[in-house]
Amino acid sequence: PASSSPWSTSPHAPHDRIIMSLKDNATWKAVKPFMNGGLSGMGATCIIQPLDIVKVRLQLGATGGPVSVAANIIKNEGFGTLYTGLSAGLLRQATYTTARLGIHAKIVDFLKEQNKGAPLPLVQKAGAGLAAGGLGAIFGSPADLSLIRMQADGTLPAAERRNYTGVGHALTDIVKKEGVGGLFVGASTTAVRAMALNMGMLASNDQAKEMMKDNGITGFPATLGASAIAGFFASFFSLPFDYVKTQLQKQKPLPDGTLPFRGFGDCVAKTMAAGGPLKFYTGFPTYYVRIAPHAMFTLIILDQINATQKAMGA
């Protein structure tokens, strides 16, 4: 006779049991927003990596537009150079984006509880983005430094190149030559840049989704539209800090042993004196084309992961 157990009457019983187990599992609930954030960021990085290295080369003085810079990289260094630093980029997403999106989700959930389920005001959304970005950047700073140095290596004279073979080589070489503290060179600037980027990206994304929902736009069109808006504001708010961060992280000691910039403020002052405020927006088209799609793909992939898990009941 057939068993009365609900698990034995369905061909999907083991799968259903796992899903029900996950749904009520406190550890899964705690880990899920961090895991989903990391996976979405890593997926976006695999798509966007070539644009990132073109952006870095432009910021470091390469002449011409994005297409000509990319063409020169392929001609002189090979197509694979466009994916230089992919290992560091993936590690950065596995640390930085895992932390920032996970922390953001936790902060938003907490604020919603405090607001008794009411939509968050824009100032609270901005605050959640600022906090998540700053804390996430602390975790991602070593990988971010490795990524910048690997991508900038090709711009240096042959005798000065570090010739990193991968992110592991970069990290160990930095520790060997500069100590553990060397992994956090420019970390404060990285954190400020991350706070600006995440405030623009996450707050505008949530706000745009609410506005679209009020106007009857839901589902994928809302996700796509909101992510595009988020990409623009992420780029606009973060580029000046990204420019300064890049200058600090790629600098090498001068002949007298001192560094060109003493810190964030010194770099800002010297950049302003040399080129005015627009200097901080060097490479904005490329930066926008790199940051906006990455933000869009990250948010789209994140929404799809969340929607799939919700549909499965996980």
Image: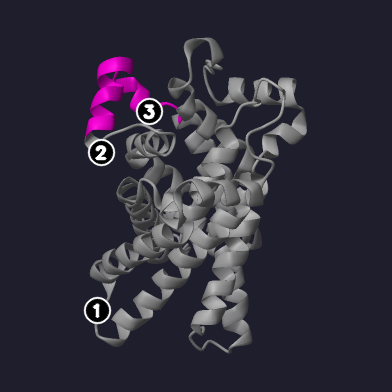
Question: Label 1's element?
Answer: loop
> Would residue 103 be seen by someone viewing this image from the given angle?
no
Q: Residue at x 50, y 26 (%)?
A: 150
The outermost residue toward the front is 273
Q: Residue at x 60, y 79 (%)?
A: 111
The reply to whether dot 2 and dot 1 touch (C-beta < 8 Å) is no
| Nearer-the-camera pick, 307 or 160 | 160
Pointer 2 or 1: first along the chain: 2
Q: Which region of the structure is painted magenta?
A: 68-85
Task: Indicate the position of residue 101 as horizontal and vertical percent values.
Answer: 53, 58
| Nearer-the-camera pick, 22 or 84 | 84
Pointer 3 or 2: first along the chain: 2
For mark 2, what is the residue?
65
| Disc 3: CA contacts within 10 A as few (<14), some (14-19) or many (>=20) | some
Task: Indicate the position of residue 164 as horizontal and vertical percent values.
Answer: 54, 18
Where 151 falls versus 115 (above or below)?
Answer: above
Task: Indicate the position of residue 146 as horizontal and vertical percent values.
Answer: 57, 31
Q: Quadrant of residue 260?
A: top right
For mark 3, what is the residue?
83
How far apart in space, not on screen, are marks 2 and 1 (Cα)?
37 Å
For mark 1, what is the residue?
217
Task: Indicate the position of residue 14 as horizontal and vertical percent values.
Answer: 46, 52
Where 270 falls versus 150 (above or below)?
Answer: below
The amino acid type found where label 3 is placed reads Tyr
Task: Tell whether position 61 is magenta.
Answer: no
| Nearer-the-camera pick, 210 or 199 | 199
The reply to whether dot 3 and dot 1 touch (C-beta < 8 Å) is no
The amino acid type found where label 2 is placed reads Gly
Q: Residue at x 25, y 18 (%)?
A: 75
